[in-house]
Amino acid sequence: MILEELGPARIAALVQDDRVHKDLYLSEELFAIEQRELFSNTWSFLGHASQIAESGDFFTVEIAGQSLIVLRDEAGEIRVLHNRCAHKGAQLLTTESGRLKGRFVRCPYHAWSYRLDGALLSYPLRSGYENTGLKACESGRGLAPVAGLHVYRDFIFARLNPGGPAFHEYFGDVLPMIDLMVDRSPVGRLQVAGGVLRNVVHCNWKLYLENVNDSVHPVSTHESAVRAAQAVARDHQPDPMPLALEQILPFGEKYEFFEGMGGKVFPNGHSISGTRFSVHSGYGNLGEYVKDLQAAHGEERARQVLEQAPQNTVLYPSLALKGSPQTIRVIRPIAVDRTVIEAWNFRTVGGPEMLLDRALSYSRLIFSPMSVVAHDDLHLFESQQKGLRSGPNEWVSLHREHDPREVDHPTRETSGTSELLMRNQYRAWAKFMTMNMKDE
Ligand code: FES
Ligand SMILES: [Fe+2]
């Protein structure tokens, strides 16, 4: 296939009601279109405001192959600028994060410098530009801001295309899941802590994102890790239960548990698995903290915040939340068969350090490639990426609990094991891939 042949009708036909074509995971052409369309039309998570606590703090991030600078300006505002010098395109900042020494950014190539709002501040040999067209063109305007920026309770999101849905329209009723996470802090504030776990998975990003809400696989995929944890618990009967066992043992639940925990889908690909309960529901009580939370938010809200502990919430296409244990995963595609997965952890400001310990322990145990759990998943993602190339079957089945009428209800509750959560992701995929394409 060549790009020109992949018009909107052909792309949409790759997503059927109950299955998707394997090209979604294998085609480099589709990956290029995803970068240009899907990741530019949707809202991507960039990072958390606590990563840039002071004026001049910055971090860099890549969305849809475009390099961005996220910084806090002199007035304390968060700004997101394209990391592309207005002169000849050099990246202004090439480190992951840091603090700017002055109140400006200077290009290392020919020393053009910019204010923290992106405006061109100065450039050498100024007289050489007199009576030229510089000031009237894009280069004279300095660093371009990103088209759409929204900071929701310190979670920073951006949309690259000027068109596309507005922030609240796009995320809609899934945003309260961020509130649930932030309100675990009595003062309503989270802080990134403990560094980031970043690893490259040799698979298409959609295989990873599907797995985030795949509550069927733990029974088989993580069987050996669970058996080992069960053996330790049985042989040593530790009291109190160590954090690691508290976190791994619930993965040994049966299919009925995962089915009964409930799921929910929302328009634009978002979903929750574990609306009723989840593997995180049984974590130990934290004593005084409960009282602090009640005093801060009232009894009803405190109860909600502590009782609702979904397995995963997907804010399509780049973010997966675990409100308890206060960790997030960020999905950053870099090639059709390469995806960077980041796991970040939060300190709950005003809450006990134990909550951060839980987050860090969970990330090490479940998300790190050196963990006793993630390598099971990583092996399967990479084996899917290879296996999909074989054989005459060109389709990936998403039939579990398919109901032809489900498309009439874009917000819908379902079982915890329904593949509606994945079908919902692919319906959003087809929508955002083609929304700006002209008919063939
Ligand atoms: S490329 Fe930045 S100053 Fe020339
Ligand atoms: Fe898994």
Image (cartoon, rainbow, N blue to C red):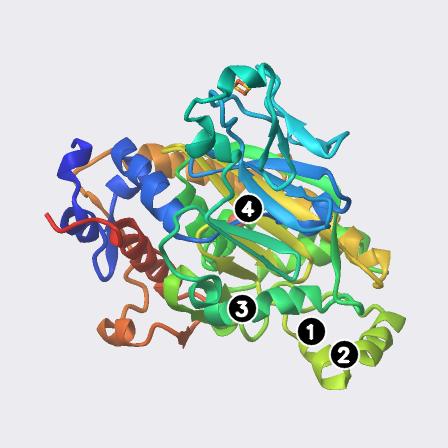
Residue matched to label 4: 330
| Dot placed on the residue nearer the N-terminal end, 1 or 2 | 2
Q: Nearer the viewer, mark 1 or mark 2?
A: 2
Residue matched to label 3: 274
Q: Position of residue 45 (x, y in %)?
A: 54, 50
Residues at discs 2 and 4 in contact (Cβ within 8 Å): no
Q: Amino acid at mark 2?
A: His
Q: Position of residue 120 (x, y in %)?
A: 57, 32
Q: Position of residue 16 (x, y in %)?
A: 21, 57
Q: Which class describes the residues within 10 Å of circle 4: few (<14), some (14-19), or many (20+)?
A: many
Helix, strand or loop for disc 3: loop
Q: Which mark is residue 305?
A: 1
Q: Residue at x 39, y 32 (%)?
A: 337
Helix, strand or loop for disc 4: strand
Compared to residue 268, the image places residue 33 above or below, namely above
Q: Residue at x 49, y 45 (%)?
A: 146
Q: Amino acid at mark 1?
A: Val
Q: Residue at x 79, y 51 (%)?
A: 357
CA distance separating discs 3 and 2: 23 Å
| Dot placed on the residue nearer the N-terminal end, 1 or 4 | 1
CA distance separating discs 1 and 4: 23 Å
Residue matched to label 2: 297
Report if residue 67 is visible in the image: no
CA distance separating discs 3 and 1: 14 Å
Residues at discs 1 and 2 in contact (Cβ within 8 Å): yes
